[in-house]
Image: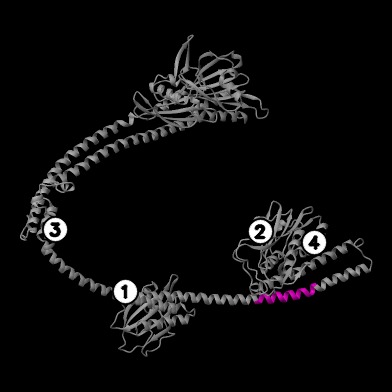
Amino acid sequence: MSNFADFMLRRDVPSLKSAGKCSGIGCFQKIPIRILLTVPCLIQIVVVVALIGWLSWWHGQQTVNRLAVQLQNEISERVRLKLETYLATPQFITAINQNAVQLNQLDLNNPPALEQYLFHQLQQFNSVSGILIGTEQGYLRAVNRRGGLHLLKLDPSDQGQVHNYQLNSTGEKTRLVGTFLKPDVRQISWYRAAVQAKRPVWSQIFQTPDNRDLSLNANVPIYDPQTGQLEGVASAGVVVSVIDQFLDSLQISATGLVFIVERNGNLIGTSTDALPYRTIQQNGKVKLSQVSAADSSHPLIQQTAQQLLQQFGDFAQITTPQHLTFSDNGQREYVRVLPYRDSLGLDWLIVVVIPETDFMAQIDHNSRVTVLLCLTAVLIALGLGILASSWIAKPMQQLSQASQAMADGDRDQRVPEVLLIQEIQITAQAFNQMAETLSLSFQQIEAANTTLETQVRERTAQLQQALEFEDLLRRITEKVRDSLDEAQILQTVVRELALELGLQGCDVALYNLETRTSTVYYEYFCADYPKAEGKSMAMERVPELYQQLLQRQYAQFCLTQPLLRDFCEDARFACLACPVTDDQGVLGDLWLFKSHQWRFNPEEIRLVQQVANQCAIALRQSRLYQMAQAQVKELEHLHRIKDDFLSTVSHELRTPMANIKMATQLLEMSLERIGLTEATAESVFRYLQILKDEGQREITLINNLLDLSRLDAGTEPYVPTTIDPKTWIPHVVEPFVERAQLQHQQLQLELAPELPPLTTDLSDLERILSELLNNACKYTPAGEQIVVTASIVETASAKPAARSTEVLRRPEADLSPANGASPTFLISVTNSGTEIPEDEQERIFDKFYRIPSIDPWKHGGTGLGLALVKGLVEKLNGEIHVESHSGHTTFMIQLPMARGAGHIKSG
């Protein structure tokens, strides 16, 4: 260690001769530690202060923009919602009055009732200033709350003099306030606007009768629902000053404002003291005139309107929400413009203006405070850096001198250990204790190596034991799972545990929870002890033990007295009882016995628990297998009974039905011999025909039942025959052509130009096509069409359809599709005029199932035809599908093209 220290110290300490020389990087290697500690820290602080100042300014700008947009959006949306709510009331009132007149609930020809109706309606809606109804006969009735409750009355006989009455709280006239001249109500602007529009419409803003405000009326024409004649106009008005008051109540910002302007530039309302109208004295009369936003007395409104006109040219050009900014006397203004429209024709603009100074005052103050604090931090950091560098440099100089002395060979050098800075004090102590620490470190490393070797050996032994137990568990589990016999499973578990764990003995018992007993089924003991197999014990004999086992917990104890065995007096065992359990419950238990001098360790207990769990799973599987075997035998027995029954019944039925058919034919021949014909004995022949049809129907039912039974049993042989579809299909269809003509149906046959030979079972395919044609002729109305088509289609390679046992056994033809695209033979039968409901299409192939709604002609049927067709198609390794919509029903049969060849049959 001393040699290494000598080398390092001599390498890094320059000689005194070169102390006065420096060039390049060597000069930077001699920077005083005071400068090295102070200057970099000061540079970092200055950079951080500058960065914080810039980020503070940038974040302030971003915050202003974000807050301005957010506040403008919120205010404009509140104004829009308030306008919708405020202006919806007069529309609602006029609609109510229109319906009341058209439903004869309000009589326009009964002025007293009309006055009371309007009065009470005004009392219910506080947001409207007045409600009016004018009629085509020249009557006008209006109530308003301008300066109290008033009734304005104008009749045709009043010669244009409107009478203004003051009303009390019950709607009665108390006094005549005065009269004023008005033109015919039918010439007033709000009346004419509704009549011309012929629908609900807003009037132009007009002056209220008391000359104190502007009003906006919602008007709706009233037409007689019977004749369509105009009866009058209902109107309800709101005053503009209410909009002004709402805008004034908004909390925008210190100097921000909001105003509403029409498309022509006239103000509707503002949040400032500037009125949206000016008062003009003209010929002794007071006239209220709307003020243009560009001419407003408020400078910010005026400047904003001029900026909008300058940018868009006209207020009518603003059709979507807009965000923009402009400068006013060096101050930045944020502007949000929101178009407002409704169904009655209103088209206004909501304008929100917020000066940037409303947000920047606090931000500027915070920025100044931040800069001041940063400068203060720089000065404090500079002073602390100089002071700290002095505290560090002096002891470091002492440590450097001592190191130089040690490098020169003085091993007794020491440095003071009591220093102000903890790290340097620790360095000094480490310098003084370095030799002793190195020696102690080597001793500790040797001791640690010895301890680690011991731990590795112990851990290796534990891992080896764990691997052995895992391997043992795997072997026992494999042997248990190899058998589905319950006795073999129990014997294997008992024998393997006893042998592998070196036990004195082991047994397994199964529970009967109904009788609360435990019966030993199998045991394995090394010595000759009395047998306990087959013995049962009541759980109440040892309730604490079995309660613990039934709770799926093991028990370990010393067995000193016999339970099921007559042990010798000196036979004592350490016993482990473990429940045989799975997720469905406790099936039994395992008892393991070893000498009382030993206990079962945790690894053995864990192994026994896992073996018990595997035993429970195997027992469940064995019992399920036995149940399944019993069910299979029962099903096979039932299937044989069914086959015997069908065979017996069909034989017993076919013989009498054949006799009935022959008797019917003989009866018909006898009637012909005695000279009876259908013309002379119509009823007799009709009954005879019914007898023949029903007999044939029963014979068909019996044959179908037998065919289905043979298909289900897989006893129907497959006889492959190669046919030419171009000649064979017309031969099958030919018998149905005459039947279709007799029923006034059109039967068409469409075959593809090139149809290759098809190898299949000829009788099965003929039966399939005949059944489908029979159904088509039966259920197709007169005048409709039946189309039979045959073609070759390419289908993508897919998993073959499920096949019956007989089909899989036949060697004559390979019906599996080829790799990639494979051709299939497609036969379809389509008839028009009938349609199968979509929810019935999956059930029509079930045995004995019929759809009553598809048989309006009451043809009847057995419900076996389509089931037989499906069975025959599956026997041929094919598929059948049905599509029914738009008055057409199509049955499609896809058959594989066989690769084998047989003799070709044409028809």
Label 2 vs label 1: CA separation? 65 Å
Compared with 475, 114 (above or below) is: above
Task: Indicate which disc residue 841 carries.
Answer: 2
Which badge, 3 or 2, is on the more N-terminal residue? 3
Viewer-proximal residue among 890 and 511: 890
**Is the stretch drawn in magenta largely helix, strand or loop?**
helix
For residue 837, say whether it is visible: yes
Residue at 37 percent across and 89 percent down: it is 529
Which badge, 1 or 3, is on the more N-terminal residue? 3
Task: Indicate which disc residue 853 carries.
Answer: none
Q: Where is residue 326 in the image (x, y as percent from the top left)?
A: 39, 27
Viewer-proximal residue among 818 and 852: 818
Which badge, 4 or 3, is on the more N-terminal residue? 3
Mark nearer the viewer, 4 or 2: 4
Viewer-proximal residue among 280 and 255: 255
Task: Indicate which disc residue 736 carries.
Answer: 4
Residue corresponding to mark 1: 463
Q: Position of residue 315 (x, y in %)?
A: 48, 25
Q: Which span of residues is magenta-colored?
A: 640-657
Q: Position of residue 245 (x, y in %)?
A: 42, 25
- Callout 2 crowding tier (Cα within 10 Å): few <14, some 14–19, many ≥20: some
Q: Is residue 781 left or right of residue 362?
A: right
Look at the numbered disc 4 and give the secondary structure of its residue.
helix
Q: What amino acid is at disc 3?
A: Met
Q: What amino acid is at disc 1?
A: Leu
Mark nearer the viewer, 4 or 3: 3
